Amino acid sequence: MKRVLVLGSGGREHAIGWAFAQSGFQVDFYPGNPGTARCGRNVKIESWETLKEYDLVIPGSEEFLAMGVADGRPNVFGPDKKGALLEASKSFAKSFMIKYGVPTARYETVTNEESLLKALENFTPPFVLKLDGLAQGKGVVIAQEKRFAYDIGMKMLRGEFVKGVGGKLVIEEFLEGKELSAISIIQGRRFALLPFTRDYKRAFTGNLGPNTGGMGSYGPVQIDDKLKAKVEDIFARTLSGLEQEGISYRGFLYAGLMLVDDDPYVLEFNVRLGDPETEAIVYMAPELFVENVLKAFNGEPFDEYFPNQYAVDVVIASEGYPESPKKGQEIHVQPGGFYFFAGVSESNGKFYVSGGRVLHAMGRGSTLETAREEAYRNVSRVRFEGMFFRTDIASL
């Protein structure tokens, strides 16, 4: 195996491709970004037929899987369109979890104003509202007041909250606890947990502000054997359920968990690697990540691995993110840091802001504190108008 294609253009895809490049593979990216061009090639793909030229294709983003890029293509490491429904439809995922005994919050599916009003009567604040379809990490709102929940819910139903995504939403019980990201490599009923990580969804320091796609992450997060067994049971139940539904699943499966009194509940499933969790997972031990992905892809025995380093990812975002990030500012980066690129464009050798999450400043070390210090040193090397970041990644 020599040629690898990574589909996507964010920090997650940069991290995946960088790891494979570190292991000696020729890596192409579609569409990629200026960072991916520094560890591989950014290519244009006019037709999915081109994918058969590659030994291994890894879809980074859920959109590719939801549109069926893995269907009938054995070189694509990801679930088919049916398996992708675990992420592409929140209502499907919730009904699936209830059916197969996967612990999750109580919920109701809403399709119109009448059912929205009725559902709001059946829950107490804070209200959790989730768009049913793919919303690029922007489809979840936690509303403290019923009137606000109603207004947001109506916008969601009309497709006005996230443009083009509407018609159905899920309202669920609010769970309070600590979040944990659990991601597995999957091949049928076999799975192996990747190092546990924790990410930070709220935009601002102190868990304030709107939900985002993620403002940073760190790992490995240490958990005890009792909790780990409960997490493994969640994956085992999920894969058994998928098999019973006639879905042959392979690739990655992400379970966003809320720990309530040491019991894990699934907040959401993603059918691909998380972002920004991937950046931390890959940076901890790139060679072990690549080794185990290849084993799973080739149908060989694979297992969880235990990195001997910590990694911290601090997202540097642009003013206005996540609602309406400012774009076009020139980015100045002092030499010496390590970054995975996300919302960055390049023109005449200069970098410019092109999205909300701009750069992932990375740190690595034998202790969490040394990794954190390095990540924030790398943040200090970056400057552009309107940049912001959380100051409490890996310390809260």
Image (cartoon, grey):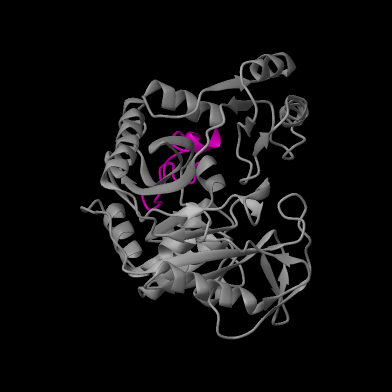
- Figure quadrant of residue 140: top right
Q: In this view, does 322 lie above or below 109?
A: below
Asked whether residue 323 appears in the rendered view, the answer is yes
Residue 361 in percent (x, y) is at 56, 70
- Which residue is painted at 41% across and 36% down in the image? 261
Q: Does the magenta stretch include residue 78?
A: yes
Instruction: Report the number of numbered marks.
Output: 0
Residue stretch in magenta: 68-89
- Figure quadrant of residue 114: top right
Q: In this view, does 68 lie to the left or right of 365?
A: right
Closest to the observer, 354 or 49:
354
Q: In this view, does 315 lie above or below 238?
A: below
Asked whether residue 5 appears in the rendered view, the answer is no
- Which residue is painted at 55% across and 85% down in the image? 336
Closest to the observer, 71 or 362:
362
Q: In which quarter of the image is the N terminus?
A: bottom left
Closest to the observer, 245 or 289:
289
Residue 91 in percent (x, y) is at 54, 26
Residue at the far left in the pictured view: 301
Residue 332 in percent (x, y) is at 70, 79
Q: Is residue 366 left or right of residue 180?
A: left
Q: Does the magenta stretch include residue 115?
A: no
Main SS category, magenta section: loop
Q: Is residue 382 above or below residue 187?
A: below
Residue 32 in percent (x, y) is at 58, 65
Q: Is residue 165 left or right of residue 303?
A: right
